[in-house]
Amino acid sequence: MNVNSLISKIETKRGSRVITYVTSDRQPPLAAKIALDTIPIFYAHLKKIGKVKKIDLFLYSAGGDIILPWRLVNLIREYCKNFSVLIPYKAHSAATMIALGADSIVMGPLGELSPIDPSIGTPFNPPHQDIPNEPKIEIGVEDVFGYINLAKEKLGITDQTNIVNILDKLVEKIHPLAIGGVYRTHSLIRLLAAKLLQLHMVEKSETLRIQQIVNDLVEKLHYHGYLISRNEAKKLGLKIEIPSHEIENMIWELYLFYVGEMGLGKPFLPTEYLSEGKDSHEFQAFISEIGSVSLQSKFLKKLVISHLPSPQPGAPPQIGIRENIIGWKDFEMGKE
């Protein structure tokens, strides 16, 4: 069954219009993140759909840009009265933030959210000491606060002079402007999470609940890789909807389509592309997709995987990967 038929089945059963957003969770060069360049793509899909009563966003992603959720949720809400997110499996970090802005979060048994404490990259981040050509080390926002809280809460250090010494040690490793960036990002993530929840939690009695949800997702789960099941998400106060068995199967079938098409969760092994006696292999891969019934938009890359000359006799063979970004391309009604 093709993707249009799978989307149509969900739309008919839920009385909604469906848009899918899937980003690859494979290793580079086949990795993708939630990104702001998708906003015009979503706009094209929404214009085709028009203003309707209900939109469902089918979502699979390991995260990405923390600014995108606020922009995307507001754009989708321009076109519907009721907005839901369908989560078959992974909706981590920035994808969790998108879900915060939905009137309901429809999660299957394997559906999972995550904390929304981000890592930041700035020009002032520390470099890799042993790998100079690698990108700079990202700084976990809550890791910085965890270091300070360890000293104050667990070691009982409260004297101001000692606190200053602790901060001096931190500044020896991390540029002060990078630490400033950590604080700003921490404040921003809390603001955006609260604003997303306020889009649908409008009663005065829900104000305290909003702050509790933000506290839990930003700080109190302690580990960015912590995975939140639908039962735990409901206990945190999120508006979780448990789908019927029939709808659950439809959502899972759509997820399996993308697994087959994009290789979601599959390790990237360059040697698999080079059969015996073949020196190179060139192909196109798409690493992100936004889809609806009449239109699929895919982010494409051209990759060339090839054997490289051995640096010296007897050395193990090496493989080179060359990539060229093509960008977003529309596929309408099965036509390019």
Image: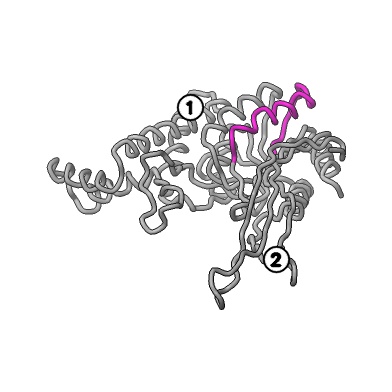
Where residue 150 appears, as percent x and y from the top left, is: 27, 51
In the image, 36 versus 48, the foreground residue is: 36
Q: Name the residue under label 1.
A: 205
Where residue 187 appears, as percent x and y from the top left, is: 39, 32
The residue sitting at 61% across, 59% down in the picture is 320
* Vertical position of residue 110 compared to residue 91: above or below: below
The C terminus lies in quadrant: top right
- The image quarter in which residue 52 lies: top right
Check if residue 200 falls in the magenta segment: no
The residue sitting at 60% across, 71% down in the picture is 317
* Vertical position of residue 246 compared to residue 124: above or below: below
The residue sitting at 68% across, 43% down in the picture is 288
- The image quarter in which residue 324 lies: top right
User: Left or right of 78: which side holds 93?
Assistant: left
Q: Name the disc covering residue 146, or none.
A: none
The kind of residue tagged 1 is Ser
* SS of the residue under disc 1: helix
The residue furthest bottom is 314
Q: Which of marks 1 and 2 is in front?
A: 2
- The image quarter in which residue 280 lies: bottom right
Check if residue 50 falls in the magenta segment: yes
The kind of residue tagged 2 is Glu
Where residue 267 appears, as percent x and y from the top left, is: 63, 61
Q: Do the residues labelled 1 and 2 touch (CB within 8 Å)?
A: no
Q: Name the residue under label 2.
A: 272
Where residue 200 appears, as percent x and y from the top left, is: 58, 27
In the image, 231 versus 308, the foreground residue is: 308
- The span shown in magenta is 34-58
* SS of the residue under disc 2: helix
In the image, 227 versus 336, the foreground residue is: 336
**What crowding class fits label 2: few (fewer than 14 Cα within 10 Å), some (14-19), or many (20 or more)?**
few
Which numbered disc flags the more N-terminal residue, 1 or 2? 1
